[in-house]
Image: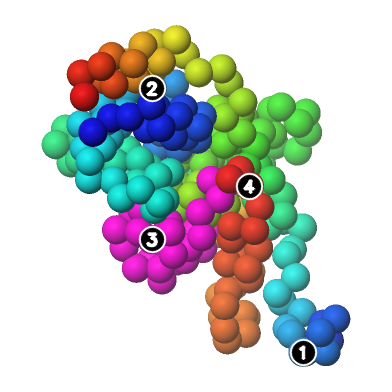
Amino acid sequence: MATPSVREEILLCLPHLRAFARSLAGNRDKADDLVQDAIVLALAAADQFTPGTNFKAWIFTILRNRYFNDLRKNRHIIEPLEAADISTLATAAHHDAGLVFDEFRQAFMTLAPSQREALILVAASGFSYGEAAKVCNCAVGTIKSRVSRARRELLRLNGEDAPKAAGRPAGRPPALLSLGASGGAK
Amino acid sequence: METSESGGVRERDSAPKPKDTRLKERVIALYEETVSEPIPEELLKVLDAALRKN
C-alpha cells in the first residue's frame, strides 16, 4: 500500500537512483526511463517492503534488476571496448581537469555493467560490500572481485597501471581497502 | 609493517595509495554529478501518478 511516507522515501532516494541508473545506462534519457520504471515497480510492490529495513537498498535492487532484465531481454549487452580502441585515453600528456574527467567518464563506461554497479555501490552510493552483494544478489566475494577488477581496469585505462598481482602480499588486495564504503554519498 | 595508534601492527599496504584515492574521488565525482542535478519534473509526475494508482 502506498503511503505518504513511501513518497518521502522515494524522493530521498531519487537523486541516488538517478546517479546509479546513469552509471548503468550511460545516458540521461535511458537512465531516467529506468528510474521511472523502478518507481512504478516499487509502488506496485510497496506492500512487499518491510518497514524498518533498508528502503534505499530495496529500490536500488528493483532498478538494477530491471536494467539487467532489459539487457537480457533485448540482447543489448555491450561488451567493454578492447583496450586498443581507447588506448588514446591513457596516452595524451597534457589535459585540463575537465578533459581528464571526461576521459575518466569514458573509461568508466567501457567497464562491464556488473563492474560499474559494484564500483558505484561501494565507492559512491554508501553501501557496504554486504549491502551491495544483496542489491546485486551475489556473494560478498563476487562484489569485492568486481570492484578489484574495475579498479585495475580504470587504473590501466588512465595510465596508472595497478600493481602486479604476483607481487602483492597475501591478504586483502589494497584496492578493496581503499575503495570501500568509507566515504561517498549516503 | 608499521604500528597503529592502538598498538596493533598492520601492513603498510593497507594505507590508500594516491592513485586509489584519486580513483575513488573520480567515481564519487561521477556519481555526485547526477545527484546534484535537480530532479526532472517528469519523474515527479510519474511518482505522483503511480502513487495515485497504488
| Residue kind at label 3, given as amino acid type | Ala
Q: Residue A32: which disc?
A: 2
In the rendered structure, the answer to whether residue A179 lies left or right of residue A78 reads right
Q: Looking at the picture, which amino acid does disc 1 mark?
A: Val
Chain part drawn in magenta? A124-151
**Chain that bears disc 2:** A
Residue A8 lies left or right of residue A164; in this view the side is left
Q: Position of residue A48 (x, y in %)?
A: 22, 45
Counting residues from the start of the chain, the first of labels 3 and 4 encountered is: 3
Looking at the picture, tell me which residue is in the foreground, A168 or A59: A59
Q: Secondary structure at mark 4?
A: loop
Q: Position of residue A183 (x, y in %)?
A: 66, 52
Pointer 2 or 3: first along the chain: 2
* Secondary structure beneath label 1: strand
Tally of numbered discs: 4
Q: Taking A123 as reference, is A63 above or below it?
A: above
As displayed, is residue B54 above or below residue A174? Answer: above
Give the chain of mark 3: A
The quarter in which the N terminus of chain A is drawn is top left
Q: Which residue is mark 4?
A: A184
